[in-house]
Amino acid sequence: MNQSYNSSLLDGAVAELSKLPGIGSKTALRLALHLLRQEKGVALALGNAIIKMREEVAYCSRCHSISEQELCPICSDSRRDQAVVCVVENIKDVLTIEATREHRGVYHVLGGLISPLDGIGPGDIEIDSLIERVTTEDVREVILALSPTMEGDTTNFYIFRRLADLPVKVTMLARGLSIGNDLEFTDELTLGRSIQNRILFSDTISR
Amino acid sequence: MNQSYNSSLLDGAVAELSKLPGIGSKTALRLALHLLRQEKGVALALGNAIIKMREEVAYCSRCHSISEQELCPICSDSRRDQAVVCVVENIKDVLTIEATREHRGVYHVLGGLISPLDGIGPGDIEIDSLIERVTTEDVREVILALSPTMEGDTTNFYIFRRLADLPVKVTMLARGLSIGNDLEFTDELTLGRSIQNRILFSDTISR
């Protein structure tokens, strides 16, 4: 739909909105018309929030999560175990893991995964800073919490190799059945892994 | 999901994005993180396009469609029949009808439909300006091209009544079978209407 709306202003906003992932030109037009119908303040608040976020956002110098201070609240929280570092792909994964309340350590946000097809190599993500962190800080355990995909596995393996000579325990998230999912709908690979990595039933009771 | 992302900037952008229709807080977060990953220019262009559109947009003084001039290109086009006015709900409908290339007249954009449940009365949309246009200009025909919904029918009827004493022909879009749709999937109401309004077969051949 390359029609013109008699207005370069509307055209411009539709063009920019449709660059967003998952927003096609029809949805972009619907959003733009919505913003035109609302009070002026709504559109101005949206535009300014986007600009302000992009211009002023800052990252934690240690874990690379979003932060307004030099160190993020998690990195500067003395009640968290600073010696257990959970490696995640992005900021969203920090939130996802925090929501489980099972990790009491800290994080290291890679900002992506190694993906040769997309031209993303180890130097493009925060791996060197992770290695330096493990070398200079007192890190007892690195938990690899990346997605169980080709890219995630590649990144896991690369980090594991880089850490091999350092005195640190490297663990990764268990792969197995999804809780609440029917056995018959579990893919063979996952089911196979869950048999290999089977756990003592008594361990599940004591928790 | 009322989590905080350790950043009032990110929180702010997510809050504003999730005010858009069809954008929930999860999608808003995905969009915001996307904007953070892109070059700075992408987010600034989007924010500025939204602000500029909302601050500088102008409407045609005659048909109320979006326009950068006092009169929109359609209203100022002497090749279009200025005496045939097609009444539509919004700017998007102008584009939809233009795409059919079947209407060679002009438009009148109401900016909404009468909807008592939503508190929208005749005074809230551009009906008075339509009546005045028909009264003062040389309008031969008013084509009611509103959606075949409760609100559309209410608005059609209200406009029809307001125009009753004026020397103008009032027509509305035909209701009937959708071209390409199976007869058995057509709803009874539409099928009934298409029988009432059946047309001479010979008329369809001569076109």
Image: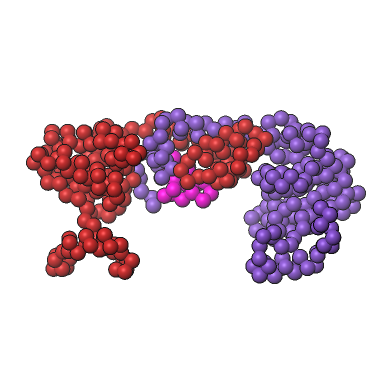
Chain colours: A red, B purple
Residue A186 shown left or right of residue A164 in the figure: right
User: Which residue is situated farthest in the front direction here?
Assistant: B205
Q: Is residue B16 magenta?
A: yes
Which of these two is toward me, B7 or B96?
A: B96
Residue B20 shown left or right of residue A136 in the figure: right
Q: Is residue B160 magenta?
A: no
Magenta stretch bounds: B13-29
Indicate the quadrant where residue B51 lies. top right
Which of these two is toward me, B149 or A153?
A: A153
Query: Which residue is drawn at the image coordinates 66% and 62% (left, top)?
Result: B181
Does B82 sit above or below residue B22? above
Query: Which residue is drawn at the image coordinates 30% and 52% (left, top)?
Result: A99
Query: Which residue is drawn at the image coordinates 91% and 49% (left, top)?
Result: B167
The mark tally for this picture is 0
Residue A5 shown left or right of residue A44 in the figure: right
Residue A73, given in percent of the width and then of the height, sits at: 26, 40
Does A132 sit above or below residue A199? above
Q: Is residue B132 visible?
A: no
Residue B152, given in percent of the width and then of the height, sits at: 71, 56
Indicate the quadrant where residue A135 lies. top left
Q: Is residue B87 visible?
A: yes
Residue A8, given in percent of the width and then of the height, sits at: 62, 32
Residue B201, given in percent of the width and then of the height, sits at: 82, 62
Query: Which residue is drawn at the image coordinates 21% and 33% (left, top)?
Result: A128
